[in-house]
Image: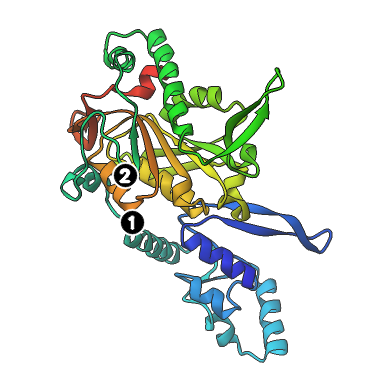
Amino acid sequence: MLTLAQCLRDLKSCKQANVPIYSFTAHQRMKHRKYLYGANIIIVEGIMALQDPQLRELYDVNIFVQCDSDLMLARRIKRDVAERGRDVEGILQQYADIIVPGVKNSVAIDLITTHVRKKLSERSFQFRDKLARSDSLVHIPTSPTASTDNLVVLRQTPQLRGIYTILRDRETSREDFIFYSDRLATLICEKAMELLPFKNITVRTPTGAIADGKDVKMDNPIRQICSVTIVRAGGMLEMGLRRVMRDVAIGSLLIQSDPSSGEPMLLHSMLPSVVQRREESGDAWVFLLDAQIGTGAAALMAIRVLLDHGVTEDHIIFVTFLGVPRGGMAVIRKTFPRIRFVCGAVDDGLEERWLHNEDGTPGRRVWSITPGMGNIGDRYYM
């Protein structure tokens, strides 16, 4: 029960959990565990689910579902009366907030679903709009070459400005857009590598001489260094990262906007194994990849996922083509000051627009980086 309670606490705290697996064949716990993360609703089911006080304290609602079979219910009552000294009323009511007597009970089902929706609503919050308007909360330099302790912007050389000119041009062909995006990704990832810890070493050259050099200061860099892509535009940076680190493990997060509210939703996660394992994630270094940071809502959720898995804040390096130093990035940098950002360039601001529904009526509000590069993912993949 202690292990189950700890797993529930982790999941309720929006952290990952490594759940033990029991073998009914071997009648013992298996060595490997099941990885779980990102549950909005957690259902604990079983004959002992309501038995332990510390488990009951973790539940938001307790539901007793009366079995459809009269015979099975009779056996349950007989057992608890004979072996546990309880009466029938106590058996049904002791730990249950709600009793669902039988099938097709729409009233009880509506009651349960309403309660669950209320709990979810109480814990949700609107933050995309606040992130977009957050430049008044904290002052961040907006110079194209501005760099601070946690923001690194590539030096704006004529070559780099020429690449961005091609990528910003709406007339650029898809073939050229892909070529120059891959070229830019390599430059940015090379810069991001400089933020890893290094140590001094010496090597013997083919001539027999000794040369001073550098190497990554880690016990197992192939295992400890990994990357997580925010699907899909973040995938544009993967080729550049693999040119810098050929064997780097790359995971992904699918974060999309809710069609009705525009708020970010985590739909799928496939993280590198070093991040999934709680005992190893503290030593992991993660390159977080996304094409651009506007309101920062998706970036904030991705960072929160990594922190929930035990990755330390100063081991996260956010790599992106384009960012807006104010707006969402300002809030993220203020909230997580030890996370470093590596940007190819920065733009001035965010432009508010409204999407329209199919019938022409106003839809939800969106924010676009200006002058920006348009929908980078569509231009690269479509």
Q: Position of residue 88 (x, y in %)?
A: 60, 86
Residue type, numbered disc 2? Glu
Which residue bears the numbered disc 2?
263
- Residue drawn at x 27%, y 14% as measured from the top left: 165
Label 1 to label 2: alpha-carbon separation: 10 Å
For the residue pair 62 and 111, the one nearer the viewer reads as 62
245 versus 262 height, above or below: above
Q: Residues within 10 Å of mark 1 (few under 14, many from 20)?
A: few
Which residue bears the numbered disc 1?
124
- Residue drawn at x 51%, y 27% as measured from the top left: 241
For the residue pair 301 and 101, the one nearer the viewer reads as 301
Query: Who comes first in sequence, dot 1 or dot 2?
Result: 1
Q: Quadrant of residue 216?
A: top right
The extreme right residue here reads: 26
Q: Is residue 151 visible?
A: yes
Q: Quadrant of residue 358?
A: top left
Q: Quadrant of the N terminus?
A: bottom right
The extreme front residue here reads: 209
Q: Position of residue 296 (x, y in %)?
A: 31, 41
- Residue drawn at x 40%, y 20% as measured from the top left: 184
Q: Secondary structure at mark 1?
A: loop
Determine whether label 1 and label 2 are within 8 Å by CB: yes
In the picture provided, is 172 more to the left or to the right than 235?
A: left
Q: Position of residue 211 (x, y in %)?
A: 62, 27
